[in-house]
Amino acid sequence: MSHPTFTTPCLTTFCGLDELGLEAVGQRLDPDRAVIECRVVEPDRWCRECGCEGAPRDTVIRRLAHEPFGHRPTTLLIRVRRYKCCGCGRVWRQDTTAAAPVRAKISRGGLAWGLAGLVLDHLSVTRVAAGLGVSWSAANDAILAEGRRRLIDDPARFEGVTTIGVDEHVWRHTRHGDTYVTVIIDLTPVRDKTGPARLLDMVAGRSKAVFKTWLAARPKPWREGIEVVAMDGFTGFKTAAAEELPDAAPVMDPFHVIRLAGDALENCRRRVQHDVFGRRGMKGDPLYQARRTLLTGAGLLTDKQQARLDALFAEDRHVEVEATWGIYQDMITAYRDKDRGLGRFFLAHTIDKISASVPEQLVEIRKLARTLTQRASDVLGYFDRPGTSNGPTEAINGRLEHLRGTALGFRNLSHYIARSLLEAGGFRPALHPRS
């Protein structure tokens, strides 16, 4: 007795051919692929010119790569009937656009499978092409065109954006130098706690002009709807945002603020190391041994690390490193405070303290003070707008690093931008192409 939830086996339903307007009439297993013979369900025997009924003339074969089942690629062998009009003599063939676009080599089911593999399973185009049994260029062109149609060219993906993040990264390393792109991230879902951040767009270059040009190309109502722009310490992004988004509040995220303080601490350590020993740090030098411990938050230090710092700061010649380390730890403590108002007060107090009176010997702190004073409103703006940080932007940059590794690098910027938008643009095709 068959189980009541099961039905009679049907190759047409199993392979999703019914949604393509096809019906399976035969099958063959070759060593390198599975071949399914199909026919078009809709007769389509009426002339579109005069309306007369057409007489069957002959049959042509159309082959389409389909989603694989198992380890073999699947090919649809479609027998398409041609008709000749009894009235006007016009000749036409059955419509197969439900199965695949005109002159396409991959079925719509195969395109959906390849797109899901690229986005959800993070497969390479080479692996997708092997699964479909087509060339790399055929798979890449067809899937990217489908991705542009379903996501990249969809104007709705810019709707509802109120918070953006901007950053840059290297997309290609060459012997002539690194090539940069500017990435714009939609941080609205993170701020509203409705979902993860997503890649909004990507443009070649990294400068004020690049970001300003991109903002100027957006519709005015869209620009007026932007409330917050999260960014790093690059002043070009801040200036571009101020000119094109005058009502938006700039926010410098904690990652880059702490990084500025960490760079000041590292530069101070190297300078003192050279002043004391006349050379760069070596394995047995106390300052060199403590280089990672110095960058660890005070609340995370182990007993061994704390003892190492106590011994380091016990020497008077390391007093400048100790002073810079104290400022670094004050800034970390301010950001880690659970009370955002109290954290804001502590960080503002720290900025005022290092801006008021710092000995001339502490050149790194004085430089840090100038930067933080100029960007004080941006730095403290983080505490006034919960959930606004460029941290998700760095996370997406990490995902794009993984994408470049999977693809073994990119040479074509247009392909890289399209693949990046599919990878991190919030596009989520159905887990199964037919669901």
Image (tube, helix red, strand yellow):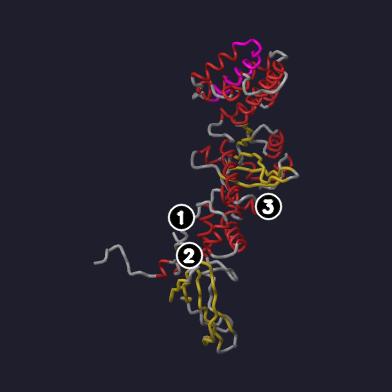
Instruction: In this rendered view, identify the residue nearer to me: 111 or 209.
Output: 111
Q: Nearer the viewer, mark 1 or mark 3?
A: 3
The spot of residue 325 in percent (x, y) is 61, 19
Where is residue 354? Give x, y as percent. 66, 17
Inspect the magenta stretch and tell me whether residue 321 lies in it: yes
Q: Nearer the viewer, mark 1 or mark 2?
A: 2
Q: Which mark is residue 343?
A: none
Q: Nearer the viewer, mark 2 or mark 3?
A: 2
Residue that carries the numbered disc 2 in the rendered image: 72
Q: Nearer the viewer, residue 296 or 417?
A: 296
Furthest residue toward bottom: 86
Local packing at callout 1 (Cα closer than 10 Å; few below 14, some 14-19, many 20+) is few
Q: Residues within 10 Å of mark 2 (few under 14, many from 20)?
A: some
Name the residue carrying label 3: 411
Which tag, 1 or 2, sits closer to the chain's start?
2
Q: For mark 3, does the 10 Å Cα neighbourhood hold few (<14), some (14 to 19), or many (20 or more) residues?
A: few
Q: Main secondary structure of the magenta part?
A: helix
Kind of residue at disc 1: Leu
Secondary structure of residue under mark 3: loop
Going by the numbered disc 2, the residue's amino acid type is Arg
Q: Residue furthest left?
A: 1
Does 119 sit left or right of 235 as displayed? left
**Disc 2/disc 3 C-alpha distance (Å):** 30 Å
The residue most toward the front is: 284
- Measured Cα–Cα span from mark 1 to mark 2: 20 Å
Give the residue at x 64% y 39%. 166
- Where residue 174 appears, as percent x and y from the top left, is 72, 46
The residue to which callout 1 is attached is: 431
Residue type beneath disc 3: Arg
Magenta stretch in the rendered image: 314-335
